[in-house]
Image (cartoon, rainbow, N blue to C red):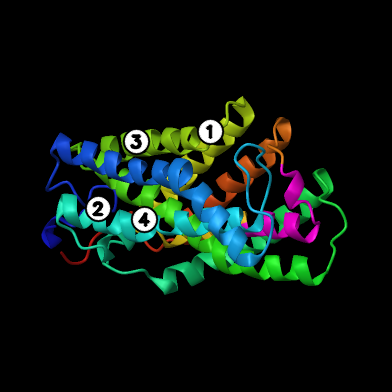
């Protein structure tokens, strides 16, 4: 990476634009994700269920179990080091440079983003409970324990997805194009579609929501020059929803939400993107300050 060229986040790997690197990055990143979802999650979940002393997850009769849920989140969190090491191996850029254009995770950027994201999600949660009631909260030892675990674990799961999609894959596609505008447009489109597809929903409303979220998170990453704000949005969204479901004791009855109600989270994602875009200092996207 050449400091004098001052590349933006999506264009930071442009010095190694070879198509084989892009394909290898996708094969490595998505391959790791598929291993987590299709291979490792079930045995890890069963092992954790047995360790916790609960009825283990049964693939023949799938239902929610604590161990399976926890294993899935922890395995997705492992995408953080996997993505960083893949960038290092394929593009010769150290893992720290995947976090931001400064080569580290910028906690100050995350703190500033929280001034936009947290109030917005407080309002969103209140509206969501009116539009789609979760039920009365049950403050039992079990629900409170699970809520605390979710608050600790879910942000890492969210960060894992961000490091893969808005990190490794976003930059791998961006490196293929000389013009920054084209690089951003193609990388945003490809990763947003991949993000929607990997969630496995054939419902048009749900797929549309995931694609909109993918576009918004990519634009936030580009504008801020790193993954901090995207990680925060993803983590706050997932954690708030999961804690709401846990406290309502409805984890056993998780169903795919569909229909026009999904326009609400789409609007929230767009509002968060606009707020974070304006919050970022300067008029241009953050650029690299050192190789």
Q: Any magenta on residue 56?
A: no
Q: Assess disc 2: are there few (<14), some (14-19) or many (≥20) residues with their C-alpha within 10 Å of its C-alpha.
A: many
Question: Residue at point 43% right, 62% down?
Answer: 228
- The residue that label 3 is drawn on is 185
Q: Are marks 3 and 4 in contact (CB under 8 Å)?
A: no
Going 39% across and 34% down the picture, which residue do you hit?
A: 189
Q: Which residue is mark 2?
A: 86
- Element marked by disc 2: helix
Hey, which residue is sitting farthest right in the picture?
Answer: 136
- The stretch in magenta equals 239-254
In the picture of the structure, the residue carrying the numbered disc 4 is: 283
The tally of labels here is: 4
For the residues labelled 3 and 1, the Cα–Cα distance comes to 24 Å
Q: Earlier in the sequence, mark 3 or mark 2?
A: 2
Which quadrant is home to the C terminus?
A: bottom left
**Which numbered disc, 1 or 4, marks the residue closer to the eye?**
1
SS label for mark 1 = loop
Horizontal placement of 267 versus 231: left or right? right
């Amino acid at each position: 990476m050449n400091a004098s060229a001052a590349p933006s986040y999506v264009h930071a790997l442009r010095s190694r634009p070879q198509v084989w690197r892009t394909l290898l990055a996708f094969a490595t990143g998505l391959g790791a994700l598929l291993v987590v979802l299709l291979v490792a999650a079930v045995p890890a979940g069963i092992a954790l269920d047995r360790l916790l002393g609960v009825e283990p997850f049964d693939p023949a009769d799938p239902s929610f179990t604590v161990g399976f849920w926890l294993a899935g989140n922890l395995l997705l969190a492992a995408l953080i080091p996997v993505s960083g090491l893949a960038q290092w191996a394929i593009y010769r850029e150290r893992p720290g440079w995947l976090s931001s254009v400064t080569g580290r995770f910028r906690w100050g950027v995350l703190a500033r983003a929280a001034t936009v994201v947290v109030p917005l999600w407080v309002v969103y949660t209140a509206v969501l409970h009116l539009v789609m009631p979760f039920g009365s909260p049950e403050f039992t030892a079990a629900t409170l324990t699970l809520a605390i675990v979710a608050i600790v674990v879910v942000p890492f799961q969210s960060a894992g997805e961000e490091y893969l999609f808005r990190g490794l894959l976003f930059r791998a596609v961006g490196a293929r194009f000389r013009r920054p505008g084209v690089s951003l447009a193609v990388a945003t489109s490809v990763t947003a579609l991949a993000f929607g597809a990997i969630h496995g929903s054939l419902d048009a409303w749900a797929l549309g929501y995931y694609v909109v979220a993918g576009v918004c998170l990519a634009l936030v990453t580009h504008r801020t020059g790193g993954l901090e704000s995207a990680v925060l949005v993803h983590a706050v969204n997932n954690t708030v929803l999961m804690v709401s479901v846990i406290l309502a004791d409805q984890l056993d009855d998780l169903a795919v939400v569909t229909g026009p109600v999904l326009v609400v989270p789409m609007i929230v994602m767009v509002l968060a993107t606009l707020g974070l875009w304006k919050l970022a200092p300067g008029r241009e996207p953050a650029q690299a300050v050192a190789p």
